[in-house]
Amino acid sequence: MNPTVLIADDEEAPREHLKAALARLWPEHRLLAACSNGVDAWDEALAQEPQVCFLDIRMPGLSGLQVAQRLAQLQEPPQIVFVTAYNDQALAAFETGALDYLVKPLDDERLLRTLSRVRQRLATQNSAPAPGTDLQALLQQLLPAKRAMRPIQASLGKEVRLIQPEDVVYFESDSRYTRVVTASDEALIRTPLKELLATLDADLFWQVHRSVIVNSRHIASALRVDENSMQLSLKGRSEKLPVSRQFQGLFKGQ
């Protein structure tokens, strides 16, 4: 089976350069998506479940590091290769072997070494530990300090209501709106869930389904319904929230 790949870079020229280099040096791979920002990269990764992601570190919306942080929480995290134009001290951390990185402009010899490492990991991933744990530990070192989350603005007629993110129990989206549910009320906003995710603290707000983000402090328990699905029970609330297969890795027990 051909390895599946996702590329994300907000600059077109490096993105196309990487696509061409992979086509030349790794012809057996299958490119699923080439994204121009981190938000789309995350969305495409959920939809298509690539085995390998090449992520530019600095991108609008979600940075490559933030996308990787979320990918590491999945039930089956992909292999991550960071791509950067900045050969700074942070790159020393990638030499731990948890990840790999490429510095732009890309060099064929360096890319071949990376691809050799990727192939080896893909060949042994059934017997080796999942990459998520090592990746999370590394990202804790590299991600910038968290900034205070901005209030969510919901229009109610002529009034604009400000909702503090920490007061939200969960977000649920449909094709047109995102439902914002607090302990005492709810509101509808037009911001798509995938864009909203970029403004939220990933340690506090967990995406558990393509259409649901939940405040982890309000989770009471997770119940496995069958091999592919779970349901969340919330503290002091009767509704159950779905957990899709990709996100079951968030609930492993101790």
Image (cartoon, grey):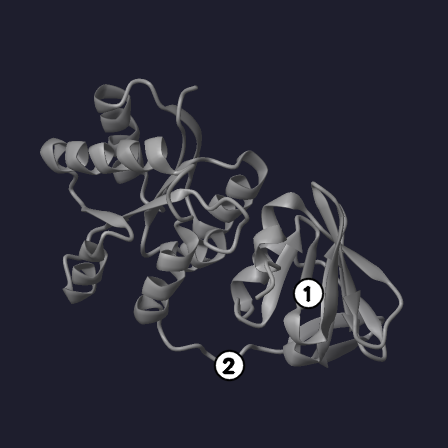
Image point (29%, 31%), residue name: 119
Tell me where residue 147 appears, x and y as whole percent.
Answer: 46, 78
Pick the front one: 176 or 205: 205
Distance from the alpha carbon under mark 2 to that under mark 1: 18 Å
Which labelled disc corresponds to residue 237? none
Pick the front one: 188 or 227: 227
Q: Secondary structure at mark 2?
A: loop
Q: Is residue 162 above or below residue 210?
A: below
Image point (29%, 18%), residue name: 27
Tell me where residue 89 appears, x and y as whole percent.
Answer: 15, 66
Which labelled disc corresponds to residue 148? 2
Image-based side of 172 in relation to 140, left or right: right
Tell me where residue 68 appears, x and y as whole percent.
Answer: 41, 54
Disc 1 residue crowd, few under 14, some 14–19, many 20+, Cα 10 Å: many
> For the residue marked with disc 1, what is the amino acid?
Val
Image point (85%, 71%), residue name: 157
Image-based side of 41 in relation to 246, left or right: left
Image-based side of 190 in relation to 72, left or right: right
N-terminal-most mark, 2 or 1: 2
Tell me where residue 84 appears, x and y as whole percent.
Answer: 24, 51
> For the residue marked with disc 2, what is the amino acid?
Ala
User: Is residue 201 visible from the viewing direction of this image?
Assistant: yes
**The N terminus appears in which quarter of the rendering?**
top left
Q: In which quarter of the view is residue 235 placed?
A: bottom right
Image point (21%, 32%), residue name: 116
Which labelled disc corresponds to residue 214? 1
Tag 2–tag 1 contact (CB < 8 Å): no
Disc 2 residue crowd, few under 14, some 14–19, many 20+, Cα 10 Å: few
Q: Is residue 80 above or below residue 51?
A: below
Query: Number of labelled discs?
Result: 2
